[in-house]
Image (spheres, grey):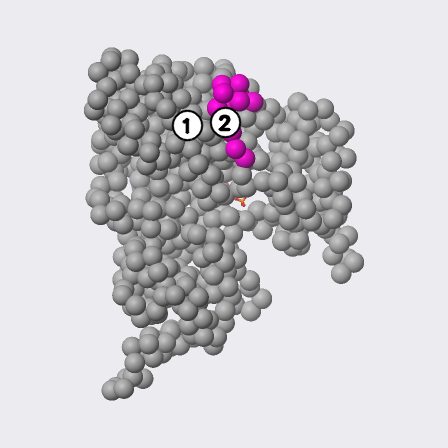
Amino acid sequence: MSGEGVSPLEITLESIRATASSYNLVPGVKYAYGTAGFRCKAEILAPAAYRMGLLSALRAKSAKAAIGVMVTASHNPPEDNGLKVVEPQGEMLLPRWENYSTQLSNTDSASLVEALKDLSEEVDVSLTSARGKIIVGRDTRDSGPLISAAVAAGAHNLQCKVEDIGVCTTPQLHWIVKQTNISKPNTIEDYYRTFSDSFINLYGKSESKPSIKVDCANGVGAKSLRSLAPLLSDYIDLVICNDGSNGKLNENCGADFVKLMQNAPQGVNYSENEHCYTIDGDADRSLFFFFQDHKFNMLDGDKIATLFAGFLNTLIHEAELDLSLGVVQTAYANGSSTSYLHSKGIPVVCVPTGVKHLHKKAEDFDVGVYFEANGHGTVLFSDTAMEVINKRAVQETRKIQQSAVTRLVAFTKLINTAVGDAVTNILAIETILKLCNLSPQTWNNMYTDLPYRQLKINIRDRDIIKTRDAERKISSPEGMQEKIDVLVSDYSNARCFVRPSGTENCVRVHAECATQREADSLAMSVGSMVFDFTEALHSRL
Ligand code: G16
């Protein structure tokens, strides 16, 4: 349709009608914006990706800013893919817009124009309003270019500018979106320069140059570290393992595998006491590990949180700053980590799984340290904190206080505050270990993890399980929590919870006990109870 008398809105709607027919819904597929966006088999993702292009364009128009769309399924297998939408300040998509995303992604092509018109009214933004901008990035999956193109097609239908930055890590995209919206240097090269400069500034030279091994899960983290390594080569040797040249993404390696199996990734030839890390498929989580007397030791997100919180707490006290510091965890946090933080007088808050929940809660503190046990996390500094720290850095003349506040300023620059970043967190951990003269053993011995076991259980419909109390209890189906309580009561000092995954088609069981054998046994009994319970429910339907 063209010619005189045709309104810009009609032209826009017509272009949607024309494109939508190439992205019809797949019969029987229901999309949902889960723990971290959409995630499913890549072959069925394009219709949702196209609709997310439309929705992100609308979000960009409503925010009058750049919005990010990351095409990744992170820790999932190579045949999956997913979408994470990034808000203007680098945060996760707002809950209200998550709901719109789920609704729109399930709207058939014929109803799409009407649904968009309704949505534009609801959010009070014209579909033809001034152009917004979408920045699209993707991980290394083969399906990435196709899914990115579907996102771009949706955004173009709403005349939204699309900048495809190609293969990048999820945290790089978050950082680029944030930097773009505050008109600061915002290219991938700027990212490498910013964080390598910050690292060099705080880390300084050492007599010997340590070698640090990183299991990159055969994912995009390898690309990032390869770019960073030469910039840091006078200070540390970054040894990249599982770079994707000889192995499958997330298969027998990567942070999710290591955390779940409590074992070393394949493809890393370690030396005793060497600093090793494992990151996930899109490089937004990292775990530390080392071998001592050939024994594998993993320091997870909880240990990283205690390291960061302890370091920052000391600096805040030494600098005599009046700033609140707290740690945000989820139900997966090891009980020992929570007790340890309490014993140090550091407040701890528990929220449901998902970076979006932790990030939001961490904003309640001047300095909010948030980590999931699986390695997602970062540190947030409130505007007040930044003001206080930067002002004191200029005014302070006393030696100890000045040194502490100088380190604080430098640390704020080493952290990717937009979102948890596996790569910059590695640099921050290495810096703290060096400045505090901490060996992996000393760090690890700060507290001893309670033995735990995590299981994935496949049931017919994970959505029938609803939780409460930050996912520590089941609210429905009725009677299931009571059964868990009975099973837990057979063990001393035990806890166990069950929750539906928001990224995989399974429910997760987490059990923590006094011994590994008990944790294994409790997880197994709860897992099989959940399976039998839900099967019985289905047979009654
Ligand atoms: C995503 C989220 C994390 C969450 C993880 C597992 O991580 O960003 O917050 O812990 O999924 O979630 P669930 O247990 O609901 O499957 P990633 O690294 O896969 O993007």
**Label 2: which secondary element:** loop
**Do residues under tags 2 and 1 come within 8 Å of each other at their CB atoms?**
yes
Residue 367: x, y in percent? 39, 30
Residue 324 appears in the figure: yes
Q: CA distance from mark 2 to mark 1?
A: 9 Å
Residue 492: x, y in percent? 72, 24
Q: Residues within 10 Å of mark 2 (few under 14, many from 20)?
A: some
Magenta stretch: residue 342 in it?
yes
* Residue for badge 2: 347
The answer to whether 47 appears left or right of 245 in the picture is: right
Of residues 346 and 496, the one nearer the viewer is 346
Q: Residues within 10 Å of mark 1 (few under 14, many from 20)?
A: some
Residue occupying the point 30% across, 25% down: 408
Q: Amino acid at mark 1?
A: Ser
Residue 432 appears in the figure: no
Residue 520: x, y in percent? 67, 31
Magenta part of the chain: 339-350
Residue 88: x, y in percent? 33, 50
Quadrant holding the N terminus: bottom left
* Residue for badge 1: 324
Of residues 397 and 478, the one nearer the viewer is 397
Residue occupying the point 30% across, 46% down: 178
